[in-house]
């Protein structure tokens, strides 16, 4: 008896046979990321190369705004520029203090928003409002609130029989005010990243630790924080990049004053370019800021690779 061959189902016939091991991927898969790479080169790589090229040239009112090679004089000037070193220290201090506060408050906020309860969706929307506001608009609002002596906060102090506080006139107080406003603005962003990490932790693990008798602090230390480590690292990198390049908050709220005590690297580069028309040196300041950020990012990646190896060795 002759058996009829069973027809091949269309779905099975449409499936391509798996590629043998070691075979090169098709050309289409290699060309797929090409548009994204071209867009990245257009919006990031080309401006970076242009800035690096300009940092090796003089372009100021002394050259008639013509671009003239100066043999690396901008970099020699940068190494001896006390104002640049001062601004670099102020920017790093601002970044470290504000990020530390934002991480602590953001973690507490994320744990609160992750807790089930009525009105959780409304609470999440309200918490994100400061982050959603444009920084310039927010800084203008805070500048009006903190005005001395006519701002609402100082008017309230005067009504209570207290002296008005020069929030934006005293160097130490102005720096602290900038940190507070930045923390108010960007803590919701950190909380949002950590909340996304909390939602990836299985509830079964929390329940298992609870049944073992672990309290809230033990569950946080033994389970939540280790599993949140990648999200904490991502939040730190994002916030450090933003804090190192802070411009609009400082420019609107304090203008870098008083007496340059709150001037950031971005504000210093802005002044060199648009006030003193020294575009070559402004490019050098911006590139040095980028190299500092790149150095911190590479150090963080090296630390991320080192910690698992040490954990495995232990």
Image (cartoon, grey):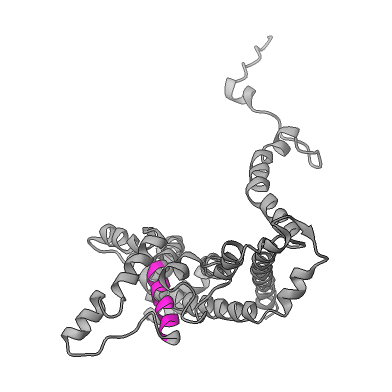
Residue at coordinates 54% horizontally, 81% vertically from top-left?
Answer: 93
Question: Along the horizontal axis of the image, is 150 left or right of 51?
Answer: left
Magenta span: chief secondary structure: helix
Residue at coordinates 54% horizontally, 69% vertically from top-left?
Answer: 267
Question: Along the horizontal axis of the image, is 275 left or right of 283?
Answer: left
The quadrant where residue 125 appears: bottom left
Question: Along the horizontal axis of the image, is 183 left or right of 30?
Answer: left
The quarter of the picture where the N terminus appears is top right
Q: Where in the figure is residue 29, as x and y percent of width and height?
A: 70, 37
Q: How many marks?
A: 0
Above or below residue 204? Residue 77 is below
* Residue 83 colored in magenta in the image: no
Magenta stretch, residue numbers: 173-185
Question: Which residue is farthest top?
Answer: 1
**Residue 130 visible, this orientation:** yes
Q: Where in the figure is residue 281, as x and y percent of width and height?
A: 69, 66
* Residue 181 colored in magenta in the image: yes
The quadrant where residue 87 appears: bottom right
């Amino acid at each position: 008896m002759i058996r009829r061959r069973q027809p091949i189902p269309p779905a099975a016939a449409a499936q391509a046979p798996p590629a043998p091991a070691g075979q090169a991927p098709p050309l289409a898969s290699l060309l797929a990321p090409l548009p994204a790479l071209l867009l990245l080169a257009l919006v990031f790589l080309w401006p970076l190369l242009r800035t690096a090229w300009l940092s090796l040239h003089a372009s100021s009112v002394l050259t008639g705004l013509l671009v003239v090679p100066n043999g690396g004089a901008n970099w020699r000037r940068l190494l001896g520029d006390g104002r640049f070193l001062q601004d670099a220290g102020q920017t790093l201090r601002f970044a470290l203090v504000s990020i530390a506060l934002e991480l602590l408050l953001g973690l507490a906020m994320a744990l609160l928003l992750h807790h089930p309860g009525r009105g959780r969706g409304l609470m999440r929307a309200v918490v994100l409002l400061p982050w959603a506001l444009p920084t310039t608009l927010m800084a203008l609002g805070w500048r009006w609130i903190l005005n001395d002596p006519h701002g609402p906060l100082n008017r309230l102090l005067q009504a209570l029989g207290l002296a008005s506080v020069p929030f934006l006139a005293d160097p130490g107080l102005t720096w602290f005010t900038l940190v507070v406003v930045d923390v108010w603005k960007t803590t919701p962003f950190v909380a949002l990243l950590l909340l996304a990490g909390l939602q990836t932790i299985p509830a079964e693990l929390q329940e298992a630790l609870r049944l073992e008798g672990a309290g809230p602090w033990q569950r946080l230390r033994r389970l939540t924080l280790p599993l949140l480590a990648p999200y904490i690292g991502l939040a730190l990198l994002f916030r450090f990049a933003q804090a190192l390049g802070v411009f609009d908050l400082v420019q609107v709220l304090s203008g870098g004053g008083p007496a340059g005590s709150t001037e950031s690297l971005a504000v210093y580069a802005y002044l060199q370019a648009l006030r003193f028309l020294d575009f070559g040196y402004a490019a050098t300041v911006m590139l040095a800021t980028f190299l500092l950020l790149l150095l911190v990012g590479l150090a963080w990646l090296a630390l991320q690779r080192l910690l698992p190896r040490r954990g495995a060795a232990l």
